[in-house]
Image (cartoon, rainbow, N blue to C red):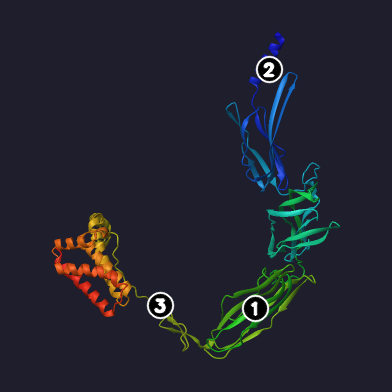
């Protein structure tokens, strides 16, 4: 009995002295973009209130799942609680899994952050326990490259196709990595609509979709790498279960695929036979130099168009520049491109248009021009030459008219009778200017003191405005006066429209009373108006006329009235208001 008690005490002591441990464990710290990561949060005590980290840069595809294990070996007990997750990375780079927390006996415990390195997509080994094994052999992303050993500036195409078998479905996909074409000139070919097609892949029939088409022109020789396109695909996979109608049930899954990196061995253009004027044109071209006219009059200009048409790297080389005599003034060219890019490469026309203006009368040759390119068909360089162009200027000054004379040691260039340029004056007549500095002037000090002098005026203006705004009674009178004038003016405008006229006239008379007697609309009864007007020394007949006209305005809107009667009512209202203005004290 004594030994049993001692054993219980030892076990209790071991439990009290046991150290609480809470840590995070991952299946690997470096993984590809298309691989999954397992992370376990393990605690050796039965803690509560577990809080997972945010998993930034990852997507949770399973979890959390909780496992609890407890054992008793050789008198020692052990306990372990585990929270497990399966994650998929969303981007390349170094990602941090932040701290998870859990509570035990009122104390908060945290795991250490874990750094995970995410690389490009890798080829995954087939794991028989992997739930996506059924998708591995049924979905592929392929990059079809038209040629893997082109010349520099020879077009190649990359077509990305997604192959998938007939027994799986695809619901959605997202790009994880876009392909990068370092040291290539690239252009994507628009795909208006994705279309499912049938084709052979690995000797079997598959469905496929063309996702992307790109034309590439390598810009340097050597081994160039095309970084892969990677996709995250949501798939529907068949199961061994069937529903009540006998149809195969499907399970939603996820698959990450990559087209893989591709290496292109680019050949340099041969040095043998390379022309000195070669500017990098590769393909099949035609070269022309065409003037808009060859016979000109004085003051006219011509356009010289240098153009190349054909198939090749149209946007990646420079056109030759014409050489003209000094007597022809040539301006910078206007460049034009009409180029279409398809899977076979670029084709179309590029041109430079030069404006040329002759300065003198005469005949001026434009030397022949040459354009060289590398012909992919024959593997040799070819050169096209344009003929010499003769420009005939029919009239105008002659270059021989320019004469240099020297007079009294001062030289003056005289240019014929046309006097296109006058000689430069060799003597100057300078006069001193007396400018007073603004700093320290009377204007400077006036502007400096002006803000301080304005302060009292601003204060007085503000107090005056506050006093006016605070006079509610006075403001109300002013407003009623304005309304009376406004409606009286409106009545005059509506004198040909009976109903609007009497409405405006009635409002004008009411607002006049409100301004003069300082009353509200609710106080405007017949007896009250009469009493107030008489108390303010208004004439008895004028008061009777005012009340009568006010009452008649309501009735006159619906009664038949002639234009003469309406004019009489308006004149009467003006007379009554004028009399009341004089009588009311």
Distance, label 3 to label 2, CA atoms, is 115 Å
| Residue ID for mark 1 | 306
Residue 452 vs 273, above or below: the answer is above
Image: 277 above or below 133? below
**Pick the front one: 484 or 428:** 484
Residue closest to the eye, 240 or 453: 240
Give the camera-side residue of 18 and 449.
18
How many numbered marks appear? 3
- Answer whether residue 117 is visible to the viewer in this image: yes
* SS at circle 1: strand
Q: Where, by quadrant of the figure, is residue 262 drawn?
A: bottom right
Task: Tell me the quarter of the picture where residue 59 sits.
Answer: top right
Give the residue displayed 67% in from the left and 69% down from the top: 315
Crowd class of label 1 (few under 14; some 14 to 19; many from 20; radius 10 Å): many
Residues under labels 2 and 1: Cα distance? Answer: 98 Å
Say which label, 3 or 2, has the lower sequence index. Answer: 2
Closer to the chain start, of discs 3 and 1, is 1
Left-right relation of 373 to 519: right
- The reply to whether residue 490 is in sight is no
- Quadrant, the N terminus: top right
Q: Name the spot of residue 164 as percent of width and height, x first.
A: 78, 55
**Residue 482 in the image, given as x and y percentages of width and height:** 26, 65
Residue occupied by mark 2? 11
- Residue designated by label 3: 426
3 vs 225: above or below: above
């Amino acid at each position: 009995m004594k030994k049993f008690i001692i054993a219980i005490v030892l076990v209790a002591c071991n439990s009290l002295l046991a150290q609480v441990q809470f840590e995070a464990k991952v299946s690997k710290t470096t993984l590809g973009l298309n691989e999954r990561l397992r992370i376990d949060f393990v605690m050796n005590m039965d803690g509560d209130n577990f809080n997972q980290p945010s998993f930034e840069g990852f997507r949770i595809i399973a979890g959390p799942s909780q496992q609890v294990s407890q054992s008793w070996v050789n008198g020692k007990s052990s306990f372990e609680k585990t929270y497990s997750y399966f994650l998929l990375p969303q981007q390349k780079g170094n990602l941090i899994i932040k701290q998870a927390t859990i509570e035990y006996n009122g104390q908060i415990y945290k795991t250490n952050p874990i750094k995970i390195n995410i690389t490009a997509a890798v080829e995954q080994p087939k794991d028989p326990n992997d739930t996506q094994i059924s998708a591995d052999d049924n979905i592929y992303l392929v990059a079809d490259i038209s040629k893997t050993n082109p010349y520099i500036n020879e077009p190649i195409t990359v077509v990305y196709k997604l192959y998938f078998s007939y027994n799986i479905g695809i619901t959605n996909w997202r790009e994880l990595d876009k392909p990068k074409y370092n040291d290539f000139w690239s252009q994507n070919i628009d795909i208006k609509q994705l279309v499912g097609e049938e084709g052979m892949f690995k000797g079997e029939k598959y469905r496929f979709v063309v996702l992307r088409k790109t034309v590439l022109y390598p810009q340097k020789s050597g081994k160039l790498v095309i970084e892969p396109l990677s996709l995250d695909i949501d798939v529907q996979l068949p199961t061994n279960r069937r529903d009540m109608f006998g149809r195969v049930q499907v399970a939603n899954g996820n698959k990450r695929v990559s087209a893989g990196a591709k290496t292109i061995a680019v050949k340099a253009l041969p040095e043998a036979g390379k022309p000195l004027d070669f500017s990098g044109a590769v393909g099949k071209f035609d070269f022309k130099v065409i003037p808009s006219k060859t016979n000109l009059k004085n003051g006219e200009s011509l356009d010289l168009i240098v153009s190349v048409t054909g198939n090749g790297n149209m946007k990646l080389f420079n056109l030759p520049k014409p050489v003209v005599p000094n007597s022809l003034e040539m301006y910078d060219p206007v460049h034009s491109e009409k180029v279409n890019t398809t899977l076979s490469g670029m084709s179309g026309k590029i041109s430079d248009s030069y404006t040329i203006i002759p300065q003198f009368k005469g005949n001026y040759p434009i030397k022949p021009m040459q354009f060289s390119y590398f012909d992919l068909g024959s593997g040799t360089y070819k050169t096209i030459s344009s003929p010499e162009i003769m420009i005939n200027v029919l009239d105008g000054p002659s270059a021989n008219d320019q004469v240099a004379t020297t007079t009294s040691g001062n030289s003056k260039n005289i240019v014929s009778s046309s006097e296109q340029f006058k000689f430069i004056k060799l003597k100057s007549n300078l006069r001193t200017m007396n400018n007073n500095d603004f700093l320290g002037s009377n204007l400077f000090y006036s502007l400096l003191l002006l803000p301080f002098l304005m302060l009292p005026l601003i204060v007085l203006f503000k107090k005056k405005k506050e006093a006016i705004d605070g006079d509610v009674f006075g403001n109300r009178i002013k407003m009623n006066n304005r309304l009376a004038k406004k409606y009286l003016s409106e009545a005059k405008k509506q004198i040909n429209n009976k109903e609007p006229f009497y409405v405006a006239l009635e409002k004008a008379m009411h607002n006049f009373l409100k301004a003069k007697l300082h009353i509200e609309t609710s106080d405007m009864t017949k007896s009250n108006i009469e009493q107030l007007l008489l108390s303010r020394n208004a004439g008895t007949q004028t008061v009777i006329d005012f009340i009568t006209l006010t009452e008649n305005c309501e009735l006159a809107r619906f009664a038949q009235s002639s234009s003469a009667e309406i004019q009489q009512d308006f004149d009467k209202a003006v007379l009554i208001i004028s009399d009341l203005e004089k009588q009311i004290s």
